[in-house]
Image: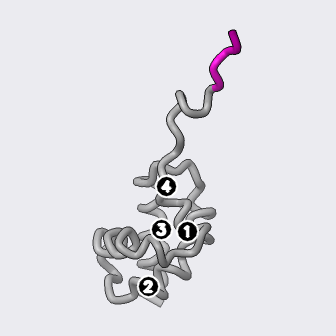
């Protein structure tokens, strides 16, 4: 039970520190299983969990991996006017 709460706290921290604009609930849904499966040894240390998940980025589920990807820069998302 304690580990579960720690993972939830970690995922909440991930939401605050992530460049992705996903909500906490979205990040929890996307990454909770991956955190337990891949980084159990790092619990309850939030910094170690984050480092573990970043090292194992290629093993994360696609939805969780997306939580670690930065948002595109505004210049990338704004189309240039046609001349």
Magenta stretch, main secondary structure, is loop
Please report the bounds of the magenta region as a residue range: 79-83
Residue nearer the viewer, 55 or 42: 55
Mark 3 neighbour density, 10 Å: few (under 14) some (14–19) many (20 or more): many
Placement of 44 over or under 20, stated as above or below = below
Question: How dense is the environment of label 2, judged by Cα within 10 Å: few (below 14), some, or many (20 and up)?
Answer: some
- The residue where tag 4 is placed is 69
Which residue is tagged 2?
Answer: 38
Depth check, front residue: 22 or 72: 72
How much space separates mark 1 and mark 3, taking CA atoms? 11 Å
| Residue drawn where x is 50% and y is 35% of the image | 73
What residue would you read off at disc 1?
Answer: 64
Separation of residues labelled 4 and 3 (CA atoms): 15 Å
Find residue 11 and name its label: 3
Q: Earlier in the sequence, mark 1 or mark 2?
A: 2
Task: Measure how far apart labels 2 and 3 are at the Cα level.
Answer: 14 Å
Q: Residues within 10 Å of mark 4 (few under 14, many from 20)?
A: few
């Amino acid at each position: 039970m304690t580990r579960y709460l720690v993972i939830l706290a970690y995922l909440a921290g991930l939401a605050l520190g992530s460049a992705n604009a996903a909500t906490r609930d979205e990040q929890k849904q996307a990454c909770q299983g991956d955190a337990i499966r891949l980084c159990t040894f790092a619990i309850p240390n939030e910094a170690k969990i984050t480092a573990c998940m970043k090292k194992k980025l290629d093993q994360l589920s696609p939805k969780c991996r997306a939580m670690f990807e930065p948002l595109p820069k505004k210049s990338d998302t704004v189309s240039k006017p046609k001349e």
